[in-house]
Amino acid sequence: MQARTTRSPFQVLDVTLGAIRTLKPMVGRIRARDRDLGEQLRRALSSIALNIAEGNQIHGGHRLERFSTAAGSAAEARTALQVAEAWGYVEYAEIHDGLELLDRVSAMLYRLGAQR
């Protein structure tokens, strides 16, 4: 199945949406085993995209705050996936591509000025 792509002028948002599409099946599987962890992962992934979009529309310090919040949410999502793997809800091979996309998003946000 070919992933649907959208092209925004802001590449980090495209990569984030790709991560969400890649991880969507895992979110459902994790949620089926651990509702709280699955919901926290879903909220963190959504928060990355929403904060990037908001940060892209504003200037100054608030822009960097939004990008920093997005970076924090990326770290949260990454850790939620690792916790799910540690509990045996998913296998590492199943989340590997999503983890790599989240790492890419984090690196892009860092270059945009996000504080860690």
Image (spheres, rainbow, N blue to C red):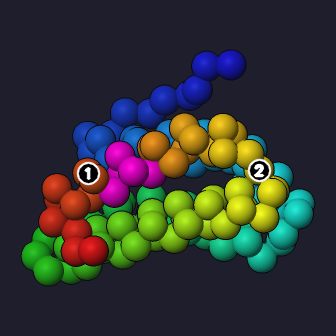
Residue shown at the point (25%, 78%) measured from the top left: 65
Residue shown at the point (36%, 67%) measured from the top left: 71
Q: Tag 2: residue type?
A: Val
Give residue 21's mark.
none
Left or right: 3 as drawn, with respect to 108: right
Q: Is residue 39 visible?
A: no
Whether 80 is drawn above or below 5: the answer is: below
Whether 116 is drawn above or below 88: the answer is: below
Q: Position of residue 95 (x, y in %)?
A: 63, 45
Q: Is residue 110 visible?
A: yes
Residue shown at the point (69%, 40%) measured from the top left: 94
Quadrant holding the C terminus: bottom left
Give residue 108's mark.
1
Q: Position of residue 57 (x, y in %)?
A: 24, 63
Residue shown at the point (74%, 45%) measured from the top left: 91
Query: Quadrant of the rendered structure where residue 72 is?
Result: bottom left
Q: Position of residue 11 (x, y in %)?
A: 29, 41
- Marks 2 and 1, the one that precedes in the sequence: 2
Please provide the residue range marked out in magenta.
Answer: 102-106
Quadrant holding the N terminus: top right
Magenta stretch contains residue 69: no
Q: Secondary structure at mark 2?
A: loop
Q: Secondary structure at mark 1?
A: helix
To which residue does mark 2 refer? Answer: 90
Q: Tag 1: residue type?
A: Met
Front residue of 87 and 12: 87
Query: Quadrant of the rendered structure where residue 37 is?
Result: bottom right
